[in-house]
Amino acid sequence: MGAIQCTFRRYEKKFILTPEQYEQIVPVIRDNMEPDEFGQYTICNIYYDTALFDLVRRSVEKPIYKEKFRIRSYGVPGEDAAVFAEIKKKYKGVVYKRRVAAPYEAIRGFVDRHEELNKDAQIQKEILSFLRMYRPEPKVYLAYDRIAFAGKNGEDIRVTFDENIRFRTEELDLRAGDEGEPLLPERRIIMEVKVPYGIPMWLVDDLSEHRIYSGSFSKYGTCYQNYIARNLFKSGGYEKLC
């Protein structure tokens, strides 16, 4: 886990693709980028929030500044697999990510009981400050299947395609398998373009040719709005959030 990148600063543009649009855009991606070394893989997340869902409620209002916290693994984690605890912040369109990595039990001890890890002391302090301020608790499990591409010849760009997004609000344990209910009613692929500055013109031109436009989309935000908030409203629990 020594070579794991733990800090990010970049712009992230999201595109919600139909299967037809996906088939149109993938050839130009393959021509100009290299497949991720891991091929297709599953990303598993547990999103943490306050008892009243303050973080996601603020996020869906699209403020200038927002933040969220999650633990993440790549696939269902084994005993020694890297699991991440990470804060993701967005300010004026720029995304900042700070994370630490350790085996699952160590990460749970760090997040749940504030037990120190033997690495990344400054990032640990930032995460612990966040945890002490918000006192977040596990709220939603979200998983999806990803194909990723990286830039060729040193071009600093990453493009990912996520589909089969599923969630659950019980069994909030990364080791409990990656099953869940579908998040979206129809098959859609979420494309994210991640760059330090602007999107390269070869991609801008192809997106324009196929009339593929960026839009706002949050997996956790969509889950909250379409399922959690609705169920709270039906059960009368939504009144506690107001």
Image (cartoon, rainbow, N blue to C red):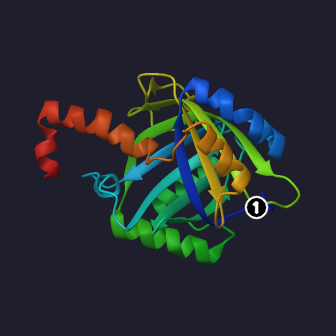
Name which residue lies at 13% across and 48% down: 240
| Residue located beneath label 1 in the image | 156
Snapshot quadrant of residue 73: top right
Give the position of the N terminus as an image quadrant: bottom right
Q: Is residue 145 above or below residue 198?
A: above
Name which residue lies at 69% across and 70% down: 119
Would residue 201 be found to the left or right of residue 219 on screen?
right
Snapshot quadrant of residue 65: bottom left
Q: Where is residue 36 in the image (x, y as percent from the top left)?
A: 79, 43
Residue lying furthest right:
153
Q: Position of residue 212 (x, y in %)?
A: 55, 40
Residue lying furthest front:
209
Q: Is residue 104 above or below residue 21?
A: below
Instruction: Classify mark 1: residues with Cα within 10 Å, few (<14), some (14-19) or many (20+).
Output: some
Given the image, on which type of amino acid does mark 1 rest? Asp
Helix, strand, or loop for circle 1? loop
Q: Where is residue 33 in the image (x, y as percent from the top left)?
A: 81, 46
Name which residue lies at 85% across and 61% down: 154
Q: Where is residue 92 in the image (x, y as percent from the top left)?
A: 45, 69
Would residue 110 be found to the left or right of residue 157 on screen?
left
Name which residue lies at 48% across and 70% down: 128
Snapshot quadrant of residue 140: top left
Q: How many marks?
A: 1
Q: 24 or 183, which lies in front?
A: 24
Q: 105 or 173, which lies in front?
A: 173
Would residue 103 be found to the left or right of residue 1 on screen?
left
Q: Is residue 62 above or below residue 225?
A: below
